[in-house]
């Protein structure tokens, strides 16, 4: 979803005016620091789209008209949803925050919105505010809560001009963009004012970029694009609470008013998924990824990533100065798949032993592509050796003097030497770990 750069520059001029002089408040800077220290969070993609079991894009993928899609809430009754269990699972996994979809692209709100009755409290037999339940449980367990909000809306009639998705939902080819933006901002305001959240995770800006290709149907829709007036929205949020953090999944450098930069299914600066490739800015960073291939529940997606690969992704994210937001997509009954629970608990076991090498750290001085990353806190560097050939690892360009080097696990000495700017580390085979061999270096 690479945004057309020329459009971005044009829209940028119009959208940041309301926050052109944005200077983050002291509370905001403190929140940013907490965010960078947290390192690990849970992403939750959940809504009425879980019922068909075809992912969160089912309305688009299956070309479901609005009047048919509106049948889903009438039998959405997730009696097995347990906020305490979800938050406890996140905590057991070592996660410090939860980001949940309060409204996805289908326009259905998963909280008690006063702006629209198209929400889980008023439109379902379940009739409960799951965001409120998560909020209260997060407060009890010391976990922070973030609100994902889709600015794209396949349901609202005033989302017009149409973007390049959701074109076959039966909405009239008319509407008023400013009316939609007021609706959007009203929902965002009620989330900011009425729930104890730590910030917003926005998505969908890319839908209004011109000449985008709908990869589901291989059809190119030509649109003019629209002014999201992001600066106005961001100012409203920071006026409500300056500590609230704002990130936007627009796949470009952050603009004024944003407080962190995210990367979808990619490490910062990478572009293996086709969504990334954005330059890395100066704000705190976050990367998000799925346990299988889907964000929302997908009945036929059984290709779950291994515990080893998920731990390594967490380590690589930290080694690239980013948080790792790992997704679960609850089933229609509200329960999380057993395969996902097992993986989260296994990650938690690893973190119980090795969390010190991740939490509160920043990017270290060493990064050998797919082989070694490093994290650092003060004078301590943690080398995360993920792949070695034999017992010796050679790290070029290590220009810092070393006071000592030990194995993190048992603090036993590690043989090392510096020669012409190359650090040679020798880790005996019986000290190596198949997931992550961690060497702790104290700098002089």
Image (spheres, helix red, strand yellow):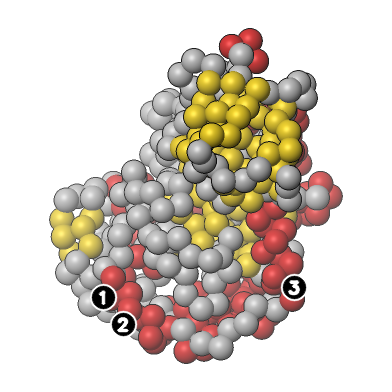
For the point 25% across and 59% down, the residue is 168
Q: Quadrant of the C terminus?
A: top right
Secondary structure type for disc 2: helix
Work out whether 176 lies above or below 169. Answer: below
Work out whether 403 lies above or below 60. Answer: above
* Dot 1 and dot 3 residues touching (CB under 8 Å): no
Q: Earlier in the sequence, mark 2 or mark 3?
A: 2
For the point 28% across and 71% down, the residue is 5
The x, y position of residue 359, in whole percent, is 71, 44
Work out whether 404 lies above or below 111. Answer: above
Left or right of 219 in this view: 256: right
Q: Earlier in the sequence, mark 1 or mark 3?
A: 1
The x, y position of residue 256, in whole percent, is 51, 78
Q: Quadrant of the N terminus?
A: bottom left
Viewer can see residue 56? no
216 or 368, which is in the foreground?
368
Secondary structure type for disc 3: helix
Circle number at residue 27:
3
Viewer can see residue 4? yes
Residues at marks 2 and 1, CA–CA distance in whole angstroms:
6 Å
The x, y position of residue 219, in whole percent, is 15, 56
Residues at marks 1 and 3, CA–CA distance in whole angstroms:
34 Å
Circle number at residue 174:
none
Residue lying furthest top in this view?
430
For the point 61% across and 53% down, the residue is 99
Secondary structure type for disc 1: helix
The residue at which mark 2 appears reads as: 10
Circle number at residue 6:
1
417 or 28, which is in the foreground?
417
Left or right of 443 in this view: 68: left
* Dot 2 and dot 1 residues touching (CB under 8 Å): yes
The x, y position of residue 216, in whole percent, is 24, 48
């Amino acid at each position: 979803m690479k945004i057309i750069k020329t459009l971005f520059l044009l829209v940028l001029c119009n959208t940041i005016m309301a926050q052109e002089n944005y200077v983050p408040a002291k509370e905001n800077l403190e929140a940013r620091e907490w965010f960078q220290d947290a390192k690990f969070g849970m992403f939750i993609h959940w809504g009425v789209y879980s019922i068909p079991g075809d992912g969160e894009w089912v309305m688009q993928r299956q070309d479901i008209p609005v009047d048919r899609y509106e049948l889903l809430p009438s039998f959405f009754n997730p009696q097995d949803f347990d906020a305490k269990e979800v938050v406890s699972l996140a905590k057991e996994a070592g996660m410090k925050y939860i980001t949940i979809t309060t409204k996805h692209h289908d326009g259905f709100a998963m909280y008690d919105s006063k702006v629209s009755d198209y929400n889980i409290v008023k439109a379902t037999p379940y009739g409960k505010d799951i965001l409120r339940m998560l909020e209260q449980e997060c407060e009890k367990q010391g976990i922070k809560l973030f609100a994902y909000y889709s600015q794209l809306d396949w349901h609202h009639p005033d989302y017009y001009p149409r973007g390049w998705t959701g074109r076959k939902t039966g909405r009239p080819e008319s509407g008023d963009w400013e009316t939609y933006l007021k609706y959007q901002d009203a929902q965002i305001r009620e989330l900011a004012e009425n729930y104890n959240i730590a910030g917003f995770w926005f998505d969908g800006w890319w839908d209004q970029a011109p000449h985008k290709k709908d990869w589901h149907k291989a059809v190119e829709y030509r649109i003019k694009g629209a002014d999201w007036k992001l600066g106005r929205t961001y100012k409203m949020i920071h006026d409500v609470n300056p500590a609230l953090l704002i990130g936007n999944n627009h796949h470009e450098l952050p603009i004024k008013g944003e407080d962190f930069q995210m990367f979808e299914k990619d490490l910062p600066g990478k572009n293996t998924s086709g969504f990334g490739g954005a330059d890395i800015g100066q704000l705190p960073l976050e990367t998000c990824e799925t346990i299988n291939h889907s964000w929302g529940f997908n009945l036929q997606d059984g290709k779950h990533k291994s515990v080893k690969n998920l731990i390594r992704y967490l380590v690589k994210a930290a080694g690239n100065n980013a948080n790792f937001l790992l997704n679960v997509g609850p089933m229609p009954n509200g329960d999380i798949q057993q395969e996902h629970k097992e993986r989260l608990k296994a990650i938690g076991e690893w973190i119980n032993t090795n969390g010190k090498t991740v939490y509160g750290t920043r990017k270290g001085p060493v990064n050998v592509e797919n082989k070694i990353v490093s994290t650092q806190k003060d004078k301590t560097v943690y080398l995360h050796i993920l792949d070695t050939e034999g017992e010796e690892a050679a790290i070029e360009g290590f220009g810092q003097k070393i006071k000592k080097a030990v194995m993190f696990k048992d603090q036993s000495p590690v043989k090392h030497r510096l020669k012409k700017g190359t650090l040679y580390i020798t880790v005996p085979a019986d000290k190596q770990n198949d997931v992550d061999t961690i060497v702790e270096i104290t700098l002089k």
